[in-house]
Image (cartoon, rainbow, N blue to C red):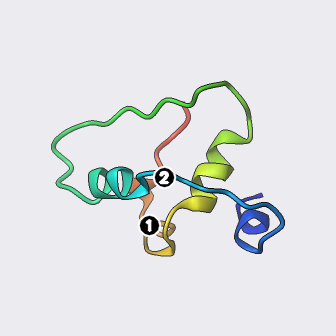
Amino acid sequence: MSLFLRLGFRKVVVDDLHKLTDVLERERNRPIVTVANHESTADDPIIWGVMPARLWWKPDCTRWTL
């Protein structure tokens, strides 16, 4: 699904994405919690789809759903 978002099948606008990417790229000594405004099995792929490609291959940056 994230690939489809990247290919333009859906237009996704993210406000303040830099705030999330800054937190993901900081030192690993502090945990973070991300919360979606609803529950869906599509949340994780959508979040991955809007992330910059440099974060796709970092396992520490894809630690979302339990």
CB of mark 2 within 8 Å of CB of mark 1? Answer: yes
Report how far apart the C-alphas of labels 2 and 1 lie in the structure: 8 Å
Q: Which residue matches tag 2? A: 62
Q: Residue at x 48, y 52 (%)?
A: 62
Residue 30 or 51: which is nearer the viewer? Answer: 51
For label 1, the SS is helix
Check the picture and name the quadrant holding the N terminus: bottom right
Relative image position of residue 28 (x, y in whole percent): 21, 49
Residue 53 located left or right of residue 2: left
Q: Which residue matches tag 1? A: 55
Check the picture and name the quadrant holding the C terminus: top right
Q: Quadrant of residue 5?
A: bottom right
Q: Is residue 6 above or below residue 17?
A: below
For label 2, the SS is loop
Label 1 crowd bin: few (<14), some (14–19), many (20+), radius 10 Å? some
Residue 34 or 11: which is nearer the viewer? Answer: 11
Q: Is residue 39 above or below residue 61?
A: above
Q: Amino acid at mark 2?
A: Thr
Label 2 crowd bin: few (<14), some (14–19), many (20+), radius 10 Å? some
Relative image position of residue 38 (x, y in whole percent): 65, 25
Outermost residue to the right: 9
Q: Which badge, 2 or 1, is on the more N-terminal residue?
A: 1
Q: Quadrant of residue 10?
A: bottom right
